[in-house]
Image: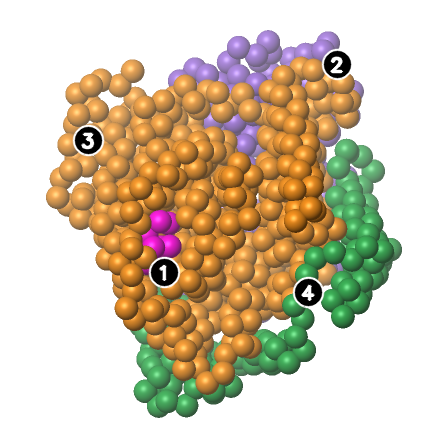
Chain colours: A purple, B green, C orange
Amino acid sequence: MKIGKLMTSLIAAAVILTFGAANAADWKPSGPVNLQIGFGAGGETDTLGRVIASVMKEQTGWDVIAENKPGGGGVAMFSGISKAPADGLVIGLGVNMPIMINLVLRGDKLPFDLDSFDYLATVARAQLAIIAKKDAPFDDIKGLVAHSKANGGTAVAFDAKPQELILRAIDKQESAGLKLVSTKSSAEMLQFVLGGQVMASFSAGTHIPYVEKGDLKVLASANDGRHNYAPDTLSLKEQGYNLFVDPYFYFAGPAGLPDDAKAALVAALDSAIASEKVKTVVANALATEVDNLGSDGTKKMLVDGIGGVKVLFGK
Amino acid sequence: MDRLLNRSSGLFFIAFGIFLYFVVIPYDTESVDYGWVRPQTVPNAMAWIIIIAGLAQLIRPTGSVSADIAKMSRAAMHLLIVAGGVLAISQFGFRLVSPLLALAIMLTVGERRPVWLALGVIGIPVLIWFVVAVLLGRPLP
Amino acid sequence: MVDFNVVLAGLTDAFQLTNLLFVLAGVVLGQFVGAVPGIGPVMAMAIAIPFTFVLDPLPAIGFLVGVNKGGLVGGAVPAVLINTPGTPDAAATALDGHPLAKQGKPVKATKMALYASVTGDTFSDLVLVTVSAPLAIVALKMGPVEVFALMIFAFSIIAGLVGNSLSKGIIAAALGLLCATVGLDPEHSTPRLYFGWFELYDGLPLASVAIGMLAISEILRRLASTNGGMKSAIEIPVAQNPEDMRVRWVEYWSCRYTMLRGAVIGTILGALPGIGSTAAAFMSYASAKQTSDDPQSFGKGNLHGIAAAESANSAVVGANLIPLLTLGIPGSVGAALIISAFMIHGIQPGPLLFEQQGRLVYGLFGAMIMANFINLFVGQVGLRFWILVVRAPESVIFSSALLLCIVGVSMATGGLFGVSVMLIFAGVGYLMTAFGYSVVIFIIAFFLGPRFEISLSQTLVLLDGDVAALVNYPIAIVLLLLAIVATWWLGFRAAARQANKQPA
């Protein structure tokens, strides 16, 4: 899987270098490039978007303006993008999960589908873990389930729909009697775990310094694969639950971009994402490495992802 | 007069609450079959509270009212002007529309002195444009 | 424990000229942008962040903290001078600040706001510098059940502001909570009451509702009663009594308990992520009013009212950094932006921050304290400037304010959709005020609504819906008892006052 992904990005990069470069050099935006961020100010996506905009501006000399367009985890922003003129002056940064979930659950009500966009790049894949306090009397999901059965229900926190679905699926599979506590952010989940109000929760990176310090431990990776900072911790799949989510941060523009404009944007994003500055921010904000799947890889990730989400929702 | 207006605002909220409870909330919330706080729980509770408090207001009107028809229609006119201005901004952009909007507002409140008109109609929009678009590098609507 | 040399090195860094200059620049920018109707401190920080990319970490974060602190002081200015608060916490300041300004004492009113703001801010900064680590551990013990009980307690205090019609107050609060339910529901994440507008998925945009209801509706009211546009936006007597131009030490000192209470409320609520400055400002204001010997004078230009609101909402900002620096948990959007600045500068916030970046953290503490002094001095100059500005005719002031609100809300919410929402709520706010329904109560309920609903959900899950299980949560029980006592006491006081009035 990892190798496959690496290959796609290598191929994508090679394609850009060989074919893209010539065309890309010819295209210049006719005005400021509007980099829309599908979330409000303050938060991982906002941080990533602003840094990438400033690096792009530095590297290409284009006037790149980052702008927040919050609403529905990016649905509002991508609704706007899908209707924007395909001139390369508007691109959007969003996260795949909310988009895919809304396409699966309420696709008929959305003004766009996957074909409404030209896909440009991914920035990184968030590493989603299930964590607990270091002194918790279990080390994996089976242990958590056993603890819950023995104590008449254990509280576990989540902050997004897919996480809730994963917990419900585990609960159903094991009849564990988990108490699912809904929260609004990973910060809140972390706070509840540290404060002892819940025994376990999801976390997408904020927990790593605590793991290093020895306050927290990781019960499982909720991704399709293990995490780089905890190579010995098994994924949910490896622990016997056929469940995973792979949240990607990705860029897209309106469908039908002119070839030269698309190539130039793909190249500009690729070199910005590969810069030291963006790497540092990704490491700090998401505790992971940059992972650009390229234009075709991004589209494939979304198409495949929709299938995975359908499974998660039992559709 | 105030009593009558107070009673009618109570009546309005009773109708509003009933409309919420029977029409809006069922139409615009999704049903789920588990959990403690369902999507409808809090909106329905609020609808009932509004109905009951509206009933109390209808029976025993309290509080003051300062409804002045002349002033309210002037406020409504200004709100319409601004709404028209925002609609125009969505079509023609802030740079073009903002001086006209400022002019309309200033004229309707009776400002006729050319210097102040110039400041409000030209000076302020240029200042906003300079600060937002030039200094901060943000797009104007 | 951080080495003393590190502390010293950090504080020395804060006093370097470049760092001080950036803090100064931040404060000036923050006060200016905060005072412009429609923008406000959070907006100012979001705008400022890109400018800090090229700086070193300490000047960058010092600059942002300066913007944040300056924005708080600036935010009180339009609230006091023209009664158009851009944020709900400034609405608490306007309750007494604007009446005082209308009496021809705008300098006095804004100065009191400045002094109280800096006092509250300094108090919470000192708490942060000295006891943040133990306080953060206490704050962690406040789980959803305790937070829910705390919110009930806060509501019971704020209920003292309902005024002369209980049924109208209840309707205003219910409408606020109802509007807060628009968007994804907290327990199941299903969209509700959004009428097909995906922009409403995250709820009604806060800036649109706050500015529409508080600022635009007031502008509409003022425009409707203007004739000729010749009047200044605020009348200041030409030969003003010098006593009305300043806050005497005696006056400041007489507010010490009010400010202390405000600062303590602000610090406690600020240290608990997610409740925010609105609750703090109004809790402080309501308790100042309730404990006053002369509650009738509140809302008519009482200095204590200004002191209570400003000390509390400013204290929240310093205290928000307690969970941020000790645990990496942001308690507000402003704090989340500071975290974002840390990350951009290659610093990972979290439990190891003090160990790994001790010098930077103490540098930041030094910068914060300096920012408070700078706030005080810049504020003295800035207030005069703004008072000069509002002497312009109403026609210019209000038409410019309208344009600024349109631009500000469109920047804050990402487009004209937010502006349309703002206009709708301006109309609603105007009508509510005309018919005697409190806009302020609506706004408090609207801002606390989301946290209230999710805390209710979390509490019911943790208790399994069994109220008897509350015995495991002693702090929550104490808070609920306090809420009952407060309600009873308020009702009792009101009844007593009523009884006193009858014979007269």
Q: Which residue is mark 1?
A: C106
For badge 3, the amino acid type reads Leu
Q: Which residue is mark 3?
A: C11
- Taking the image as shown, residue C108 lies to the left or right of residue B21, namely left
Please indicate, yes or no, whether residue B60 appears anywhere in the rendered image.
yes
Q: Position of residue C393 (x, y in %)?
A: 38, 77
Which residue lies at the image location 50% right of the left edge and 31% below the top edge? C272
Callout 1: residue from which chain? C
Q: Which residue is mark 4?
A: B65
Q: Assess disc 3: are there few (<14), some (14-19) or many (≥20) residues with their C-alpha within 10 Å of its C-alpha.
A: many
Report the Cα–Cα distance between label 3 and label 2.
Answer: 52 Å
Compared with C261, C32 (above or below) is below
Quarter of the image with the N terminus of chain A in it: top right
Element type where label 4 sits in the image: loop
What's the magenta region? C105-113
Q: Assess disc 2: are there few (<14), some (14-19) or many (≥20) residues with their C-alpha within 10 Å of its C-alpha.
A: few
For badge 2, the amino acid type reads Gly
Quarter of the image with the C terminus of chain A in it: top right
Front in this rendered view, residue A266 or C11 = C11
For badge 4, the amino acid type reads Val
Q: Position of residue B11 (x, y in %)?
A: 83, 62
For badge 1, the amino acid type reads Pro
